[in-house]
Image (cartoon, helix red, strand yellow):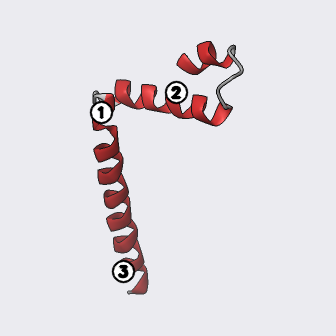
């Protein structure tokens, strides 16, 4: 949505536009403020690592 508007300017790399679009969607679906996104992402990465460790531990048995 936002990236569609900015895409027309052609001065912003597409990767950054996609990131802006993802952040916009995240802030809408998770009801978090953009300033809270870094901490949210950090928490989600930690959760993912814990789940992956649990899966690896279960696969060993």
Q: Which residue is mark 2?
A: 21
34 or 60, which lies in front? 34
Q: Nearer the viewer, mark 3 or mark 2?
A: 2
Q: Which residue sits at x=60%, y=12%?
A: 5
For disc 3, the neighbor class at 10 Å (few under 14, some 14 to 19, many from 20) is few
Q: Going from the N terminus, do you reach mark 1 or mark 3 first?
A: 1
10 or 28, which lies in front? 10
Q: Which residue is mark 3?
A: 57
Q: Going from the N terminus, do you reach mark 2 or mark 1 first?
A: 2
For disc 2, the neighbor class at 10 Å (few under 14, some 14 to 19, many from 20) is some
Residue lying at the far bottom in this picture: please name it.
61
For disc 1, the neighbor class at 10 Å (few under 14, some 14 to 19, many from 20) is few
Q: CA distance from mark 2 to mark 1?
A: 15 Å
Q: CA distance from mark 3 to mark 2?
A: 36 Å
Quarter of the figure that contains the C terminus: bottom left
- Counting from the top left corner in percent of width and height, residue 7 is at 66, 19
């Amino acid at each position: 949505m936002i990236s569609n508007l900015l895409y027309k300017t052609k001065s912003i790399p597409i990767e950054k536009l996609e990131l802006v679009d993802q952040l916009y969607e995240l802030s809408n679906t998770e009801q978090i403020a953009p300033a809270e996104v870094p901490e949210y992402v950090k928490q989600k990465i930690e959760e993912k690592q814990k789940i992956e460790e649990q899966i690896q531990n279960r696969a060993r048995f």
